Amino acid sequence: MKKIGLLILLIGVFLVLQPASSYAIKLQADTTTKVEDDGFTTVGSAEDSVANSKVAPATPVDTVKKDAVTAAANNAQKPASLWITFGLGLLGGLAAFILPCIYPMVPLTVSFFTKRAETKGKGIQGAILYGLSIIFIYVSIGTIITLIWGGSALNQLSTNGFFNVVIFLILAIFGISFLGAFEIVLPSSFVNKLDAKSDSKGLTGIFFMAATLTVVSFSCTGPLIGGLLVSIDKDVLTPIVAMFGFSLSLALLFTMFAIFPSWLTSLPKSGGWLNSVKVVLGFLEIGFAMKFLSTADLSYHWGILDREIFLGIWIVLAIMLGIYLLGKIKFSHDSDLPYVSIPRFFLACVSFVFALYLMLGLFGAPLKAVSALVPPLSTQDFVIGEGSGTSSSDKADTGGVKKRKYSEFLHIPHNIDGFFDYDEALAYAKTVNKPLFLDFTGHGCVNCREMEARVWSDKRVLKRLKDDYIVVSLYTDDKTELPEAEQFDSKILKTRVNSVGLKFQHLQATKYNTISQPYYVLVGTDEKELVSPPIGVEFDIDKYLAYLDQGLAEFAKQKNK
């Protein structure tokens, strides 16, 4: 059972706290998120058709076609995204169960129901009510989060520098607490009051017993819940669904052991291995926190967390974790380790291999497996074979453009010779008679990095982007301040457009009625869409190629008219 428990932990940790998976499997959730309070609607919905008709003229046929295609896509994507969120919540609950704040409470819970149950039937009924109470408490927390902030507000905050720094500090503190530096607990008076109420008879006592479990285990579940909520897509239902999955795992486990107390004999005894689980999660939590500091650093161009520094921190954490698992490092709450178990040995090997993999990135390797999490290659000072990580657009002098706007701090991967300003790119496209490839992206957009690493890197896709299109990457979350003469008030965003990011966010909202990223639009020199609707995340390279080829075919038809 101990081996099974560690296996569950490994799966849960990598899927819940290791954000590569959670971000990678967001799929097209980013492409369907709208800020409804600010006048945006879901792509493909009936409201979207009305909004688009106000923004740009469209024929009835075009509108119907766009609605039919996009609505069908979103109807499939939305449930899929929520099911993935639910699954991540389930795994988070499984990981939480074997933490030292929860696992030792299983015998106490079973004893609680055994003593108060007059008959077996009432005992089962009480156990089920206990499980439902756990679910109710955690789902209520998710609902409160949604009501206070809402999915759109969380999505807007995701690139805010202050917000990301705060999240970084919170997760770092949680991680350090997992290492044993201190315990994060709620006030003892509050815990004692709940515990006293749990002695009440009937449903009230059962509910407060569940509440006591929630409060007492906060020091373990808090970091897990926090990591879960900030690592997945911010939608209105996301916090609720995530908390439902998380609580369902815990509720089912506690309920089944309460109904079948004899199962307790098959569980491994509490011991030092529980604290080891906590320490492993602490290392991962600290590594996860670095992603949020990196997002703020990229958006504001602070330059304090370039790619090699970020990778260096992760490499050190991975090596330290491997050494810890081999028993060469001991923290305050750790027990003596007389020998290294097989599961610990293999987990240590995984950690060392991951560190070696990351080391290749220091010399310019793309690191596709973690490309969505680490800073872009353009922030790296030294890349073998290139001399630097800078984009070729910094040095380009194509079409008489000596220095392209914003190229001193913005970059396009794979040495694509592109632009960063819509008007400048459009003017150049007209001179060379090529269609535009609008790439609405962001520094904090992990799906954008996934697309660039997994799809753009394909030789066929890269050839079309380099040879057949004028690529313009529009960073909608860049915080570089605009000159006073270029600032204006945006009615659709309901804010003052005073940064480069807001400038292109306004452009995207005005023309395409969405502010989601990634969002890829193929446009002719007449500024009309070549293919409707545009697409977002599409990891199927053949489908992405078909989209690009269709745009080229439509542009060729226009030239031949």
Image: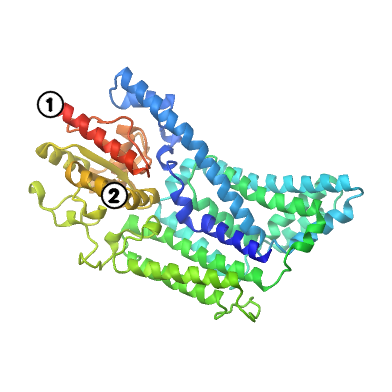
Which residue carries the number 1 mark? 560
Viewer-nearest residue: 140 or 71: 71
Pointers 1 and 2 in contact (CB under 8 A)? no
Q: State which quarter of the image contains the C terminus.
A: top left
Residue positioned 28% across, 26% down in the render? 56
**Which class describes the residues within 10 Å of circle 2: few (<14), some (14-19), or many (20+)?**
few
Q: Amino acid at mark 1?
A: Asn
Q: Secondary structure at mark 2?
A: loop
Cα distance between the residues tagged 1 and 2: 30 Å
Tell me if I can see residue 306 in this picture. no
Q: How was the colour assigned to the protein in this rendering?
A: rainbow
Quadrant of residue 346 within the rendered picture: bottom right
Q: Report the disc number at residue 424.
A: none
Q: Position of residue 366 (x, y in %)?
A: 32, 60
Question: In the visual, does 397 lie left or right of 94?
Answer: left
Residue positioned 18% across, 41% down in the render? 468
Q: Amino acid at mark 2?
A: Asp
Q: Report the disc number at residue 458.
A: 2
Q: Position of residue 248 (x, y in %)?
A: 66, 47
Residue positioned 17% across, 30% down in the render? 556
Viewer-nearest residue: 560 or 505: 560
**Which class describes the residues within 10 Å of circle 1: few (<14), some (14-19), or many (20+)?**
few
Q: Furthest residue to the right? A: 118
Vertically, is 493 above or below 92? Answer: above
Q: State which quarter of the image contains the N terminus.
A: bottom right
Q: Earlier in the sequence, mark 1 or mark 2?
A: 2
Vertically, is 260 above or below 44? Answer: below
